[in-house]
Amino acid sequence: MTSLVPQSGFYTWRPSVPPWERGVAQLLRWASGQIRVIHCCTPLNLGAELAALQSAFDRGQPRLPRFRHAPAGTADLSERLRRAADELAPLGPVAELYAARAVELALENALCRNAGTPALQPLARSRYGRRDSFDEQADRLSEQWLAAPRLHEVADHTTISDDGDDPNSLLSRLRQEVGHWRLPVRVLTSDRMAALAATGQGVIYVAVGKRLSGRTVERTVLHEIQGHAWPRHRAASATLGIFGIGTAHGSDDQEGRALALEDAASLLSPSRRLELAWRHLAGRTVEQGADFVATTRLLIDDAGAATDTALRIAARVHRGGGLARELVYLPAFLRIRDAWRRDRTVDVVLASGQVSLGAAVTLTPWIDTATAVAQ
């Protein structure tokens, strides 16, 4: 059913919200708030164990990590989500998006329950597995970036990531941008992060104690504010809850979009490309069954990474017992960049919430294009 509503000075047909949407959105919104995959899979002792691993490798006695995790989630929640998906599937294209996200949330709940156990890796390969031809293209792109000449990049200046007294630090710059755009977002620090920053609902976390160049700070600010915080903010006022809840693979393609924004702003520097290629290569070793030491040795011996960098990346892809979420980044980057080349207007939908490229066509009628473009 559709309704006649004013938009941008004229009338246009807009779909009506299905009667089942409110209840389903409440369930999925609540579930997504309970299911925190990265949090559950990030070791409680990440910093201390990385330091111990560095010492072991320096002594020529590499060992497997002794990470500790805090699993969460319940089997009942996964079952409830799957039942909801079964009920939604026959109700049309929009309902299918909610059903697919319910199934994905059930899988992510299982990841949280099995963090730190051997059961996690097969679940992770199901969640972050290969989707389309862009996975093979990403393998080739990773190889190209690894083979590129290693140019020394001179930093204009450096700051400590969480230095609140330095206006050029990552923490300060993110707070400045949040204030400038009046986003309802807190910027906090965290000592349990593999990334420099991470955006969640109403919050951006900044890693502590990282020395960063000005270029890296600005790239990270663009990635988190334009790539993640703004779509989440727009989703809060969307007619359909799925924009905020996220579609299946929505978080994956949003990471690709954030990288595409970096590329468009000429901030995808050689060092950034090398880091992404190392992560992708490391993720593939997890996919192929390598253990932590084998991944680290490959990064050092074959890919030219320094020991501390190799350990950090290995810890990232092996978190939780082999999450390797990094495998979605480069395929999503290529997927979004290809979509932009064919029709850049698709970004109006992608910028309106946690939306995947595959869901964009179905969700296009629900977008107030004039408002989205103005923002």
Image: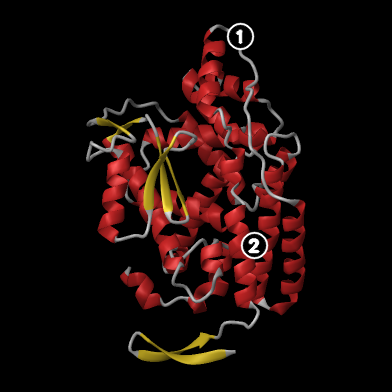
Q: Which residue is mark 1?
A: 61
Relative height, residue 184 to residue 88 (above, below): above
Packing grade of label 1 (10 A; few <14, some 14-19, many >=20) is few
- At x 28%, y 38%, the residue is 164
Q: Amino acid at mark 2?
A: Arg
Packing grade of label 2 (10 A; few <14, some 14-19, many >=20) is many
Position in image of residue 311 (x %, y %): 53, 23
Position in image of residue 303 (x %, y %): 52, 24
Position in image of residue 304 (x %, y %): 49, 21
Q: Quadrant of the C terminus?
A: bottom left
Marks 2,1: beta carbons within 8 A? no
- At x 58%, y 40%, the residue is 139
Answer yes or no: is residue 167 visible: yes
- At x 55%, y 89%, the residue is 2
Q: Which residue is mark 2?
A: 101
If you read the primary sequence from the N terminus, does the residue marked by circle 2 or circle 1 appear first? Answer: 1
Comparing 6 with 75, the one in front is 75
User: Left or right: 16 with respect to 201?
Assistant: right
Q: Quadrant of the N terminus?
A: bottom right
Relative height, residue 24 to residue 280 (above, below): below
